[in-house]
Image (tube, grey):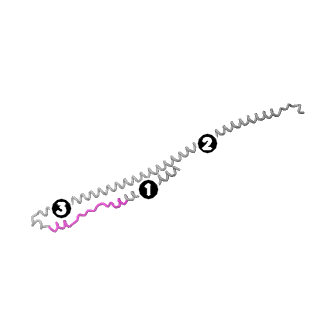
Amino acid sequence: MHQDHSVLPMEEASQKCKEKIQAWVKVVKEERAKVVVQDLAEQKRSQTSLKQLEEKKIILTFEQMQTFLDEKSSYWLACLEDLKGKFEEKQQENVTRLSTAFASLDKLISKIEEKCQQPTSEFLQDIKNTLDRCEQKPGMQLAELSGLEETLEICSQRNSALEEAIQKYKDSAYQSLTR
């Protein structure tokens, strides 16, 4: 029976099997190399996508913060501008009142000095009115600024609190971003 087919010597059969296995190993190694290259490409693509996503999140976060700060800055500056206008208005009222009082006092001084220069007979006539005018204090009331000063103090305190909060934020952000 063994004579019907040819039998390869053991060495030769072993060699042929080794060659087939080595060819198969070579193909598998090439396939593995392709998988490694694809894996690296996928990791790079994934890292790039994550990086882009993080960049977008960072940009969005800072844009939101900038928008918030712009809104608050505009609001506070408008409030301060309004307060400045009210201060100027009250100061103008006071300047007007002081000018009026100054003019009235000048007029009174002039009349009294004139009265003192009159001859005795004229001087003594209507002396009661003259003395009454001398004893009267001119009614001068300045515009009240204390409410505005209180509002300005509140603005100043808010600004100090904001400066403190910004410093705390800077410190916290620096620590968070440098970890």
* Count of residue discs: 3
Badge nearest the viewer, 3 or 2? 2
Quarter of the image for the N terminus: give it: top right
Q: The residue tagged with tag 1: helix, strand or loop? A: helix
Give the percent coordinates (x, y) of residue 42: 62, 41
Q: CA distance from mark 1 to mark 2?
A: 44 Å
Q: CA distance from mark 1 to mark 3?
A: 56 Å
Please report the residue visible at 39 percent of the width from the left and 57 percent of the height from the top. Answer: 156
Specify which label sits upstream in the sequence, 3 or 2.
2
Q: Which residues are magenta?
A: 127-151
Residue beneath label 2, please? 43
Q: CA distance from mark 3 to mark 2?
A: 96 Å
Q: Residue furthest right?
A: 1
Amino acid type assigned to the residue bearing label 1 in the image: Glu
Give the percent coordinates (x, y) of residue 117: 11, 62
Q: Is residue 111 above or below residue 18?
A: below
Please report the residue visible at 23 percent of the width from the left and 63 percent of the height from the top. Answer: 138
Front-most of residues 122 and 166: 166
User: In this rendering, would 177 be left or right of 108?
Assistant: right
Q: The residue tagged with tag 2: helix, strand or loop? A: helix
Give the percent coordinates (x, y) of residue 23: 73, 34
Amino acid type assigned to the residue bearing label 3 in the image: Ile
Q: The residue tagged with tag 3: helix, strand or loop? A: helix
Q: Residues within 10 Å of mark 2 (few under 14, many from 20)?
A: few
Residue beneath label 3, please? 109
Front-most of residues 114 and 151: 151
Amino acid type assigned to the residue bearing label 2 in the image: Gln
Q: Residues within 10 Å of mark 1 (few under 14, many from 20)?
A: few
Specify which label sits upstream in the sequence, 1 or 2.
2
